[in-house]
């Protein structure tokens, strides 16, 4: 559980006919990097099916800082809660890089789900997984150090989107350091300190738009609190 949704995306779980039908219900829209798809608190009810690219789902804390609640990729749906219940948006969604999305009006999405039990079950499963992830993140914020949370996040990123390049797992995602900090509920300075420690231990390497993980097992141990000095 963590930043990512389910391993099988909503679109990936639909059959070809249902996917084709869903596409006819919306309008394609291109979002430049950092462009908002929707904003926390607004009273809109459309949903967006991500066709290409990545988005961040985030919220503003009482102190005015951002906390990233999730990363959403092609095939996933964002804005579905407001589309289903009509209540104000519970979070903002922003394009992490260039994104193409299918904007589907809420009434059309509700009708689509009502007519297709399998699609409705997929949507319920998606919402359940995200609630479980949110529960885990709340526990992590309350009980884990910054180094533990960062280690857990790096393991998650490497497991989900890492690619073997040479002797390391390389994570290629346009996630800036302040966004990485927001994903673990910490400050940029604290995460920079933790990253420096991991680099000094030879566990990670950083570069523009990339993170390279040399060995996942020490990071798993750090995340569990079983090894290494913590901050």
Image (cartoon, rainbow, N blue to C red):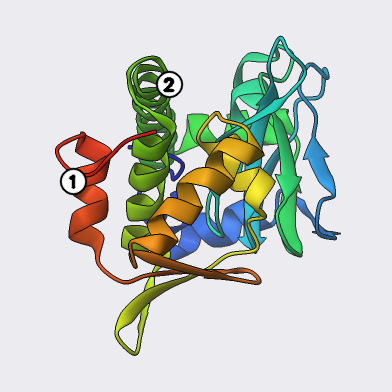
Relative image position of residue 7 (x, y in whole percent): 34, 52
* Residue furthest to the left: 226
Q: Residue 28 carries which label?
A: none
Q: In this view, does 63 lie above or below 146?
A: above
The local secondary structure at tag 1 comes to helix
Foreground of the two, 176 or 91: 176
| Residue found at x 22% / y 49% | 220
Mark 2 or 1, closer to the camera: 1
Q: How many marks overall?
A: 2
Relative image position of residue 77 (x, y in whole percent): 58, 44
**If the image is split into quadrants, where does the N terminus sit?**
top left
Q: Name the residue under label 2.
A: 141
Q: In this view, does 76 lie to the left or right of 217?
A: right
Marks 2 and 1 close (CB-CB < 8 Å): no
Foreground of the two, 59 or 66: 66
Relative image position of residue 109 (x, y in whole percent): 63, 35
| Image-quadrant location for residue 143 | top left
Foreground of the two, 82 or 97: 97
**If the image is split into quadrants, where does the C terminus sit?**
top left
| Image-quadrant location for residue 48 | top right
Q: Is residue 69 left or right of residue 42?
A: left
Q: Is residue 149 left or right of residue 223?
A: right
Q: Mark 1 points at which residue?
A: 221
* Residue furthest to the bottom: 166
Task: Report the Cα–Cα distance between label 2 and label 1.
Answer: 18 Å
The local secondary structure at tag 2 comes to helix
Q: Can residue 112 be seen in this view?
A: no
Relative image position of residue 38 (x, y in whole percent): 79, 34
Q: In this view, does 114 lie to the left or right of 162?
A: right
| Image-quadrant location for residue 121 | top left
């Amino acid at each position: 559980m963590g930043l990512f949704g389910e391993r099988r995306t909503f679109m990936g779980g639909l059959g070809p006919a249902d996917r084709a039908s869903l596409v006819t219900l919306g309008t394609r829209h291109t979002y430049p990097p950092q462009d908002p798809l929707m904003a926390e608190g607004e009273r809109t009810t459309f949903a967006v099916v991500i066709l290409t690219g990545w988005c961040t789902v985030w919220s503003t804390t009482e102190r005015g800082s951002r906390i990233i609640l999730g990363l959403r990729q092609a095939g996933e749906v964002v804005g579905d809660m407001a589309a289903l219940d009509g209540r104000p948006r519970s979070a903002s969604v922003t394009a992490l890089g260039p994104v193409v999305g299918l904007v589907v009006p809420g009434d059309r999405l509700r009708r689509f789900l009502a007519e297709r039990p399998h699609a409705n079950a997929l949507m319920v499963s998606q919402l359940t997984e995200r609630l479980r992830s949110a529960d885990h993140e709340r526990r992590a914020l309350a009980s884990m150090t910054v180094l533990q949370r960062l280690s857990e996040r790096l393991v998650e990123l490497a497991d989900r989107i890492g690619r073997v390049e040479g002797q390391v797992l390389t994570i290629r995602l346009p996630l800036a350091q302040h966004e990485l900090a927001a994903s673990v509920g910490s400050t940029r300075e604290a995460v920079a300190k933790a990253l420096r420690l991991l680099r000094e231990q030879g566990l990670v390497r950083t570069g523009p738009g990339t993170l390279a993980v040399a060995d996942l097992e020490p990071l798993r141990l750090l995340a569990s609190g079983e090894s290494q000095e913590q901050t």
